[in-house]
Image (spheres, helix red, strand yellow):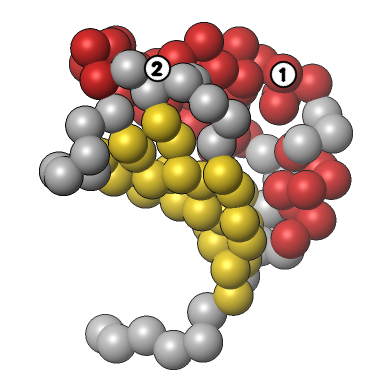
Amino acid sequence: MILEHADIRIDPARAAEFEVAIVRGASTVIAHAKGFKGYKVNRSIESPGRYILMIYWQALEDHTVGFRESPAFAEWRAIVGPFFAQPPVVEHLELVDRSA
C-alpha cells in the first residue's frame, strides 16, 4: 500500500467552498480509479488555507500512471485546481510501522 501525501494551499477565504469541492472530487473522481483504497482530508489549525490530502493506493503506479495519465486526472484538477494558491507538494510514502 502506498500513501500519497498532498500539501495543498488555498486562499483561506474560500475554505468552505474548497472543502465541498475536494470531497466531491475525491468521492466522485478519484474513488473510481484503479488501485484506490481510501482517502482523508485534514485542515490545518495553525495555518488557515493549508490542507493535507492523503490518498491510499494499492501500488505507486496506480497513482503515477493509471490516474495521473488518465482523463480522470484532468476532471479532478478542474474541480479542485481553481482553488490552489500554488501547486500542491505531492510525495509518496511507504508504511514502516503503525500502532493499532
Which quadrant would residue 93 be assigned to in this image?
Answer: bottom right
Depth order, front residue of 76/88: 88
Between 79 and 46, the residue placed more toward the observer is: 46
Question: Disc 1 or 2, which lies upstream in sequence?
Answer: 2
- Picture coordinates of residue 32, whole percent (x, y): 62, 35
Q: Amino acid at mark 1?
A: Ala
- Could you tell me which residue is drawn at 75 percent across and 38 percent down? 67
Relative to residue 19, is residue 61 depicted above or below? below
* Mark 1 surroundings within 10 Å by alpha-carbon count, few (fewer than 14), some (14 through 19), many (20 or more): some
| Quadrant where the image shows the N terminus | bottom right
Question: In the picture, which quadrant includes the C terminus?
Answer: bottom left
Q: x and y percent of residue 37 in the render?
A: 54, 55
- Secondary structure found at label 1: helix
- Disc ID at residue 43: none
- The picture places residue 14, in percent across and down from the top left corner, at 28, 12
Residues under labels 1 and 2: Cα distance? 14 Å
Vertical order, 33 against 62 (above or below)? above
Amino acid type, mark 2: Ala
Residue holding disc 2:
21
Q: Position of residue 63 (x, y in %)?
A: 72, 48
Q: Secondary structure at mark 2?
A: helix
Is residue 17 found left or right of 52 in the rendered image? left
The residue to which callout 1 is attached is: 74
The residue lying at 55 percent from left, 17 percent from top is 81
Q: Is residue 26 left or right of residue 34?
A: left
